[in-house]
Every structure is written in C-alpha cells, then in structure tokens.
Amino acid sequence: MCEDGAAAWGAIIKVLFPSTYQTLSSWLRTKSAAHEVVLRNAVVHLTQLLGNDPGVVALAGENAVTVLARRKSLYSTMRKLVTDGRVREQVHDLLGLRIIITPQPGSPVRAAHLSIAQSKPTSV
C-alpha cells in the first residue's frame, strides 16, 4: 500500500476505533525505548558477526553486509488487531531485522550471479 493510502487507513481506523487506537498507541510508546535498545544491539551484533564470518567474507567480500532494523508501525499493528481479530499479545512481529548481503566485484557470488544473468535469454 502506498504511503498516502496507509495514512488514510490509519486515520479511518483512528476514527472508527478511537479507544483501541489510543490504548495501542500508549502501549507501543511504553515499549519504544526498550525496542530501540534491542534493535540497536541486534544491528551492531549481527553486523559484526556477519562481517567477521569467513564464509560470508569469502562469498561476498569485505563490507558486504548491511543490517537494517524497524519497528512495526502503529497503523500496521492496529490493522492486524482489527482485520485478524487478534489481541496485542498475539502480534509477534513488532520488531524486524533485514540482512542484506551485497556481493562485491570479484566475489564468487557476484561472478556466479552475473554468469546466470548473462545466460538468460532476452525477450523480444
């Protein structure tokens, strides 16, 4: 969903379920500081761990790992409660991590990927 659409649905949900929306907003705010610490520590730990892993370095090269963190938005959390009929304790994906490994030029993975890409027929 586009950003404007999500904002519109967020406003609609806020109007239709004001008490639930406010309660959920307050609950998420109480967890915010702890979530930030957990995410920050996870990003640092995973970046160091994967960046120092000989297998990852051998396959993708130096500085090939990016670790991103996010918290589920209030709108997205509220949507799960409303559309799925869950209670907030049943939403288990409030925090998320994304690990991106970008093979560097000259790495075996990059060479294999380029070889595969070049062998695919092009459409007319």
Image: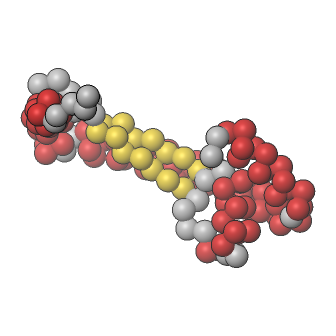
Report the side of 35 relative to 52 (left or right): right
User: Quick check: 96 left or right of 91?
Assistant: left
Name, please, the residue furthest toward the front.
124
Q: Quadrant of residue 55?
A: top left
| Residue at 74% over, 68% down | 82
Does 81 appear above or below 15?
Answer: below
Residue furthest top as drawn: 105
Q: Is residue 86 above or below residue 78?
A: below
Pick whichever, 39 or 102, lies toward us: 102
Q: Quadrant of the C terminus?
A: top left
The relative height of residue 64 versus residue 91 in the rendered view (above or below) is: above
Residue 90 locus on image (x, y percent): 61, 74
Across and down, in percent, residue 39 comes to 50, 49
On the image, the x and y values in percent for residue 31 come to: 67, 58
Question: Would residue 60 be visible to someone looking at this image?
Answer: yes
Query: Where does residue 29 sit, x and y in percent of width and height?
Result: 74, 54
Q: How many marks?
A: 0
Lateral position of residue 82 relative to residue 12, left or right: left
Horizontally, residue 47 falls left or right of residue 10, namely left
Give the residue displayed 77% in from the left and 62% down from the top: 24
80 in relation to 36, above or below: below
Whether residue 26 appears in this view of the structure is no
Decide which of 65, 102 is in the foreground and name it. 102
Question: Nearest the camera: 19 or 34?
Answer: 19
Residue shown at the point (49%, 45%) measured from the top left: 69
Q: Tell me where residue 64 sits by quadrant.
A: top left
**Scheme of image coloration:** secondary structure
